[in-house]
Image (cartoon, grey):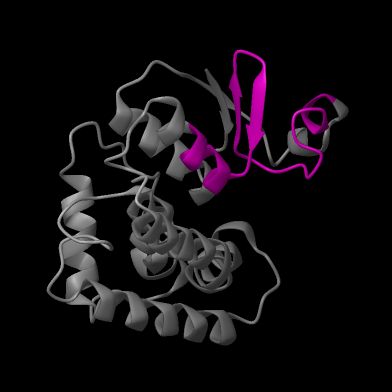
Amino acid sequence: MKLYHHPLSGHSHRVHLFLSLLGVPYELVEVDLAAGAHKAPEFLKLNAFGQVPVLDDDGAVIPDSAAILVYLARKFGRTDWLPVDMLAAARIQKWLSVAAGEIAYGPCAARLVTVFGVNFHADEVIARAHRILTLVEAELTGRAFLLGDNPTIADIALYSYIANAPEGNVDTAPYQAVRAWLSRIEALPGFVSFRKTKIGLAA
């Protein structure tokens, strides 16, 4: 398996982290976003949207981080990470939608301002980040992971941008349950960290 990624992309890190936690062999292929490699014709054949990550599993090409997480869990029969129970699967899907919505438009967007110079209104996206962090904090209070005692791909989908939220000037200090949850994920065997940048509150 080849994972086309960029080390500063939280979407890429989700998949990199999950592959490492699964302990399966894979190859990392860095896509030079600054040089526009993700918009080159060759890459667009892999993902017409011109985005990382993309997983190439011996010719089976899967773009989109959430889709890849689901694919990997199903491929390796890891019902611990993605249960077959309908209610649990629905709860996980909710968090995958949160990752693509509130996380993307909150802590991810705030970080895009500082790390990549994207022209978003910083105050607006930081406020969005705190709204979703408040909801996640409530969900994790008295609970080890989003669905209970064990991690699922829901936790993996949210981890990266929350972990590096301070780079986007989003202070995570008030969210004690979230911070404890981050530590629990970081203690999992096979954990790989998301590259840090000394910017924002992380400077």
Provide residue 6's location: percent of width, then percent of height. 56, 38
Residue 87, by quadrant, is: bottom left
Horizontal side, residue 4 vs residue 184: left or right: right
Start-end of magenta stretch: 42-71
Q: Is residue 126 visible?
A: yes
Residue at 25% x, 50% y: name it: 151
Provide residue 112's location: percent of width, then percent of height. 59, 63
Provide residue 31's location: percent of width, then percent of height. 65, 31
Residue at 62% x, 57% y: name it: 116
Residue 92, by quadrant, is: bottom left
Horizontal side, residue 9 vs residue 137: left or right: right
Horizontal side, residue 117 vs residue 75: left or right: right
Horizontal side, residue 123 vs residue 184: left or right: right
Q: How many numbered marks appear? A: 0
Residue at 82% x, 24% y: name it: 42
Q: 33 or 2: nearer the eye?
A: 2
What quarter of the picture does the C terminus occupy?
bottom left
Q: Is residue 197 visible?
A: no
Residue at 43% x, 68% y: name it: 200
Please check the rendered image and state whether residue 54 is part of the magenta-colored stretch, yes or no. Answer: yes
Above or below for 25 versus 92? above
Q: 81 or 47: nearer the eye?
A: 81
Residue lying at the far right in this picture: please name it. Answer: 41
Please check the rendered image and state whether residue 167 is part of the magenta-colored stretch, yes or no. Answer: no
Q: 6 or 87: nearer the eye?
A: 87
